[in-house]
Image (cartoon, rainbow, N blue to C red):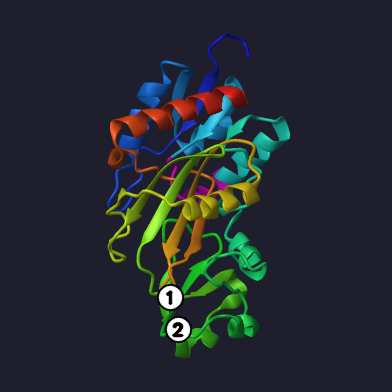
Amino acid sequence: MSSSRPRVLYVTDLAYPAKGRRYCDEDIRLTSRLRSAFDLALCHPLDAAALMDGFDAVVVRNSGPVLGYQEAYDEFRALALERGTNVYNPLTGRADMAGKQYLLDLSAAGHPVIPTVDRAADLGRLPEADAYIAKPKLGADSVGLRVVPAAELAELPYGDGLLVQPRVDFQYEVSFYFVDDQLLYALYAPDPARRWELRPYEPTPADREFARSFIEWNTLPYGIQRVDACRAPDGGLLLVELEDLNPYLSLDLVDEATREAFVSAMEASVRASV
């Protein structure tokens, strides 16, 4: 590090058109605060590989699904690993950062995850349901997701990297937001049909243990992660997704004290990683 203030390249797509959310507002707020601690510059994900060598850390935030720029992301990832670039989050994530294979692995190992298979031969492992969810292993932000009647399951193109899960009649979805191993807040969607109409949620001790178990499983040394779960009909939580690449944080929906605590934790985490 060449100065007392780390140089941070903040990767974001300010024009990404998220459904029902404004990713750019979140990054504008975050970077306006982080500038007090870092020499900070913003760049589009398409420019990250060309610019990253001039910085002490590359913070990947609301850069949108990498499917939209897969070749550029693969180049960035390969170069960062080759050069030992400090990327935040680290590129060793085992969850969404690496695709959705982890849902299969966790399901097979008996973790509290929505049952998941990727082969027609394994459909018998899924509980019976009126309908099922099919989604690509490399999908993100619901891209490619569709609802499939039970009668059509055998006809799906499983060899194309498709995952299948039963459609769970859950009570609500809830997300837990972590910096490093610290749970900062949780939000939930009381109406299952309105995923992004979120409200503050007070997690129980059991909820905290559930969420933390997946953070520990992922073994990232530092970074921002979001654990998405649903409350199943039996009252238990099931993992929906472990977002460890660029999770949207919904910081506009928490109170000022919580937002300040998150920014402070993120600042300390990025600084410690350099």
**Left or right: where 142 falls relative to 270:** left
| Residue 159 position within the rendered picture, expressed as x and y whole percent measured from the top left | 62, 75
Q: Nearer the viewer, residue 15 or 255?
A: 255
Name the kind of residue labelled 1 in the image. Answer: Arg
Mark pair 1, 2: CA separation: 7 Å
Which residue lies at the image location 61% right of the left edge and 68% below the top edge?
Answer: 107
Say if residue 59 shows up in the picture: yes
**Residue at image location 48% in from the left, 51% down from the top:** 205
Residue 148, given in percent of the width and then of the height, sits at 43, 80
Q: Which residue is mark 1?
A: 167
For the C terminus, the quadrant is top right
Residue 112, above or below 155: above
Looking at this view, is 75 or 182 the one in front?
182
* Circle 1: element type: loop
Asked whether, in this view, residue 220 is left or right of residue 172, the answer is right
Q: Name the magenta segment's main secondary structure.
A: helix
* Dot 1 and dot 2 residues touching (CB under 8 Å): yes
Dot label at residue 273? none
Q: Does residue 67 appear in this view?
A: no
Instruction: Using a 10 Å C-alpha cutoff, classify the residue at mark 1 as few (fewer than 14 neighbours), some (14 to 19) or many (20 or more).
Output: some
Most extreme residue toward the top is 3
First along the sequence among labels 1 and 2: 2
Q: Nearer the viewer, residue 172 or 82?
A: 172
**Range drawn in magenta:** 62-72
Residue ranking furthest to the bottom:
151
Quadrant of the image occupied by residue 124? bottom right
Residue at image mark 2: 129
